[in-house]
Image (cartoon, rainbow, N blue to C red):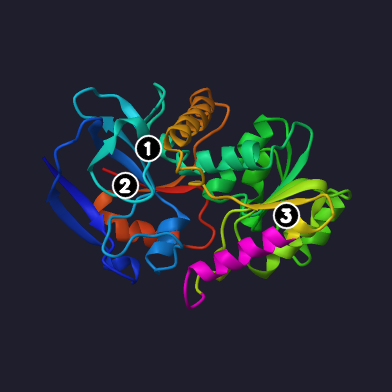
Amino acid sequence: MQTTEIVLPGIGEPETLQVRARELPEPANGQVVVRVEASGISFAEQQMRRGKYYDMPPFPFVPGYDLVGVVEGTGRRVAALTKTGGWADRVVLDEADLVPVPDGVGAAEAETVVVNGVTAWRMLHRAAKVRAGQTIVVLGANSGVGTILVQLARHAGIRVIGTASPKHHDDLRALGVEPVDYRGGDVPARIRELAPGGVAAVFDHVGGPGIADSWRMLAPGGTLVGYGSAATRDHAGDPRVPVFKLVARLLWWNLLPNGRHATFFDLWKGKRNLPRFRHQLREDLTAVLELLAAGKITARVAKQFPLRDAAAALRFAETAGVAGKVVLIT
């Protein structure tokens, strides 16, 4: 059986992506062939093509952090977190890594909440442990993760203040978010006006020097969750250095006697205990997919592209202000 896949040959512009056909290996015991229906483009792939993702495989490789597809021979629609390899029309995966997709949920819609949904759910409920009635700040509330995070928070009865450019404010208000223009002057001061006593959690994908502003937004007992370093995306040098610096800063703040907490969220933390990791992944992703199926949260597909147009899709995903998830379909 053949697969068509998209290869990232090395550091370069999106147009350097290559389309390749190859024979799939025979599935081993406990593995299945999944016919991919949809795979997503996340910030991870944008970093990988620059050679800036801190935990990426050597070139060349097939990107694709997550996917939704159908198990060959059974027709079961499933979702999977892959980290790499998802930009293909067929893949071989361990059956234990597959999570059922509820009936009535389309492939592209389900795809928007795989890595984004699991990330948002775990940051909100496992890392920050935010409770109903509390207030949080979500930086980039219109982003792929941000869009899901604010919906999960509002569903849980949490007040949300979200930063975004003004063109996204009406959409955020429709989700129950109080929007703040991230380019509109002193953002921390504006957020202090909305939450004078500070907030229970800040979710910051930007990193860089601005992480200090996020720390100052917290109320006593609050948690800062860093989950990226977008501010250093184009910095030269070892891609791990900005992440290490960010993590070190967060760890240092934890040593201060101020009653606040900071953490860097790593989706793959705990994978050494693979059975437990798989159990939690299935539990968390199932919860998000069930909310999607019930209409409690909505999928936001920014745009769909055919798999073979992955270069154009990646270029579009890197356009400033894209709201929601860019999806490759086969």
Q: What range of the chain is rendered magenta? A: 235-252
Q: Residue at x 11, y 40 (%)?
A: 1
Residue 280 left/right relative to 222: left
Disc 1: which residue: 80
**How far across and down, in percent of the image, does residue 32 sit?**
23, 32
Disc 2: which residue: 86
**How far across and down, in percent of the image, does residue 207 sit?**
62, 63
Disc 2 to disc 1: CB gap under 8 Å: yes
Look at discs 3 and 2 and give the one toward the viewer: 2
**Residue 191 visible, this angle:** yes
Disc 3: which residue: 180
**In this view, 28 is above or below 64:** above
Amino acid type shown at disc 1 = Ala
**In this view, 46 is above or below 1:** below
Look at discs 1 and 3 and give the one toward the viewer: 1
- Foreground residue, 106 or 256? 256
Q: Residue at x 42, y 61 (%)?
A: 46
Q: Residue at x 73, y 54 (%)?
A: 180
Q: How many marks?
A: 3
Mark 2: secondary structure:
loop
Q: Residue at x 58, y 27 (%)?
A: 296
Pointer 3 or 2: first along the chain:
2
Residue positioned most to the right: 196
